């Protein structure tokens, strides 16, 4: 089955990015988990998953609401690319933490995660989304401070994951 993008978004930033990533890769299946059951992820072997971070390092609310069901999903045999939105200046100690939370859960359930992204161009201090020195576990974006870099970051990342995620 084709690839799908799953996201949730409180003020619309992650939604815009999810649609932009899908367009870039020619993916038609884009699902907001506020209105789609997370079990739909089970229908796809290749998925792109995105969340913004809220509170102090928390998942976005709709992901949080779906979390118990999400934790029941089996990711073995699935290839997953992650993206996260956050604010590296105001939340420098928790920048895109939600992406790290997603990563921990899906790797525990067998996912192969692709699309690691270098962290050197960011000014944050700490992030739960850094598991390997020098890298985020997926694409990190910052619409609050660096929206002018978003399109180019998406282009480069999509080029990198294209072969494995499509
Ligand atoms: C109250 C509040 C708490 C936030 N907490 C974090 C945080 O802990 N870490 C982070 O990286 N960004 C944080 N952010 C920034 C949001 O993740 C960012 O604005 C994001 O683009 C929102 O995307 P959305 O509209 O798709 O939900 C926070 C923003 C607000 C207003």
Image: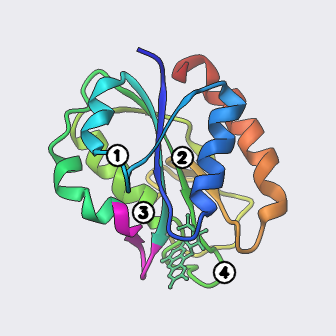
Mark 4 close to ligand 1, CB under 8 Å: no
Considering the numbered disc 4 on the image, is that residue within a helix, a strand or a loop?
A: loop
Is ligand 1 less than 8 Å from the beta carbon at label 1? no
Q: Which mark is residue 138?
A: 2
> Which label sits on residue 89?
4
Please tell me in which quadrant of the rendered image residue 122 appears.
Answer: bottom right
Which label sits in the foreground, 1 or 4? Answer: 1
In 3D space, how far apart are the residues under numbered discs 1 and 2 (Cα atoms)?
Answer: 23 Å
Circle 3 or circle 1, nearest the eye = 1
* Span shown in magenta: 54-62
Residue that appears at 37% across and 49% down: 103
- Mark number displayed over residue 36: 1
Q: Of 124 and 31, which appears nearest the observer?
A: 31
Relative placement, left or right, of 164 versus 17 is: left
Of the 4 image quadrants, the one containing the C terminus is top right
In depth, the one of 61 and 121 nearer the eye is 61
Q: Earlier in the sequence, mark 4 or mark 2?
A: 4
* 43 displayed left or right of 69: right
Task: Write down the residue under mark 3.
Answer: 98
């Amino acid at each position: 089955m084709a690839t799908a993008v799953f996201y949730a978004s409180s003020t619309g930033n992650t939604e815009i990015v999810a649609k932009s990533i899908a367009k870039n890769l020619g993916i038609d299946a884009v699902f907001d988990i506020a209105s789609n059951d997370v079990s739909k992820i089970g229908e796809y072997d290749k998925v792109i998953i995105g969340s913004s971070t809220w509170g102090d390092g928390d998942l976005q609310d709709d992901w949080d609401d779906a979390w118990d069901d999400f934790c029941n999903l089996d990711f073995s045999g699935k290839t997953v690319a992650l993206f996260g939105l956050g604010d590296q200046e105001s939340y420098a100690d928790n920048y895109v933490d939600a992406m790290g939370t997603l990563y921990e859960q899906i790797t525990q359930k067998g996912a192969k995660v692709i699309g690691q992204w270098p962290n050197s161009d960011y000014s944050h201090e700490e992030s739960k989304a850094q598991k390997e020195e020098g890298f985020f576990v997926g694409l990190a974006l910052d619409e609050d401070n660096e929206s002018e870099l978003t399109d180019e970051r998406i282009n480069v990342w999509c080029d990198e994951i294209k072969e494995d995620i499509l």
